[in-house]
Amino acid sequence: MRRTLLTLALLASVLTAFAQTYTNEDEWQAYEDFNNVFLDTQKNIYRDHSERQNAVDRWNGAAAIWCQAIFFDMALNAYRRADKEGDTARKAKYRLLFQRIYAGEKAQYVDFDFDNCNTNTGWFVYDDIMWWTCALARAYETFRTSAYLTYAEKSFCRVWYGSDKVGDDGSYADPARGLGGGMFWEWQPIDKPKAHQNGDFRSACINFPTVIAACTLYNNVPDGRSTPTAARPARQTREWYLEKAKEIYNWATSTLVQNGRVADGIHGGGPEFTDHLYNQATFIGASCMLYQITGETKYKTQAIAGADYVFRNMTSSLYLPLERGVEQGIYGAIFAQYLPMLIYDMGQTRYLTYVKRNIQRAWDTRDTVRGIHDGDFQSRTVVASDAKVESYNASALPALMLMFPVEEGPDAVEEVNAAGGEAPASDVYMLDGRRLYSGRAAASPSLRRGVYLYGKKKMLVR
């Protein structure tokens, strides 16, 4: 008995306790509060920070064009979650909200004319366009509205091939042209661009979103299309999208990834390693999607390595990092978009411990008047109710809450007590069935005194 208690005490010493106090309704409210503060309900696009009255344009209150795509994704995620929960009222509500945001974004950004390169409301960096390709392709996947697919494919092909109107040669660094492979980040100058050279910047933030976009299009375009003959087509075949997804992924992982760590990009020399959460996120997402399509284990292995790097090397006291540069606060919301594929679709539930701890931390330290959080999971400073908060930073909490629903206690209890080892033996649960920890991933300090479920048996921690 003493030996058993000692073993349990040693186990407890490597686990960090926290009490989950937020509910399913709280998660919905966090998204409502985000929209109440940041959504311009006249234009149905998002403002850049809480002190803005209107989202006029890039220079006057509107959030960055590529970040609008992430907020667009959040509206889509709200609809998907309501649908999954069988909540017909919320499903109708968020479909209407999504339609309004789609119309607002389309009107703001030159009717989704991706050949319009004005630097205020137009398109002038490849990755800005590709983030929207991903979002529009997911919209088509959800609603089957043909316009969403049309714009998704037009935007993808505009990035890949370049534009006759703008005169750029496209993002694809064609090895056949001696450009080395992968995707270029931008074209310069904006109005009369020069042809790309091998040493031009190829960043993770265009390469992995390109893979995600290509995979999503592969999953949704019809079979049997004829191969286009135009030099710059507006759409491609299903097979072509998968072929290019694999090609870009192979280049990006062999060039930009080392042991799960994603470099920010390359200018022609070696990879330039600066850790960014959104690069890790899209690497994880691209890996998961290719694994789901092909079943090849190498992609799953890469996805796990990418997540492991985040939680082992990029966190402080197990909390997600916040970057406070221009627009960088959005990175947490992007991480929320892609990590669920690894956790829920690929069974890597051990990461839930980290995610739920981060959600709880943000929930505990939010501004309870406005219902928003400033995105800094590592600080215990509660946001002052009159403080300026960027929509980028504030998006992390509602984005995570939308994608990681509260687990219901009875289901968890049933899983713990089920025969046949359905619950991992190393998972630790509260007596009411709430999972506290998945495996031994968390670190000190110890569990609080009390009785827990461990290995489907009660565990006493003194």
Image (cartoon, rainbow, N blue to C red):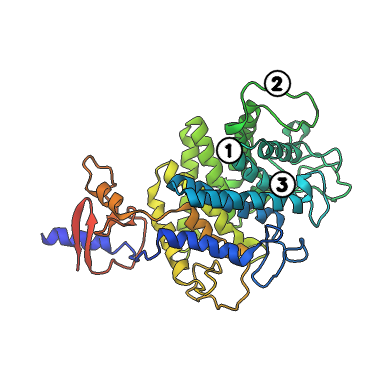
- Amino acid carrying mark 2 in the image: Ser
Tag 2, which secondary structure?
A: loop
Residue plotted at (57% across, 32% down): 219
Quarter of the rendering occupied by the C terminus: bottom left
Q: CA distance from mark 3 to mark 2?
A: 25 Å
Alpha carbons under labels 1 and 3: distance apart = 18 Å
- In the foreground, 443 or 229: 229
Which quarter of the picture shows residue 146?
Answer: top right
Q: Tell me the residue that label 2 is attached to.
A: 226
Q: Earlier in the sequence, mark 2 or mark 1?
A: 1
Q: Which residue is mark 1?
A: 141
Q: Quadrant of residue 312?
A: bottom left
- Bin the neighbour count of mark 1 within 10 Å (Cα to Cα): few under 14, some 14-19, many 20 and up: some
- 456 shown above or below 165: below
Q: Nearer the viewer, residue 271 or 173?
A: 173
Report which residue position mark 3 lands on.
129
Residue 331 disc label? none
- The residue nearer to you, when weighing 50 against 202, is 50
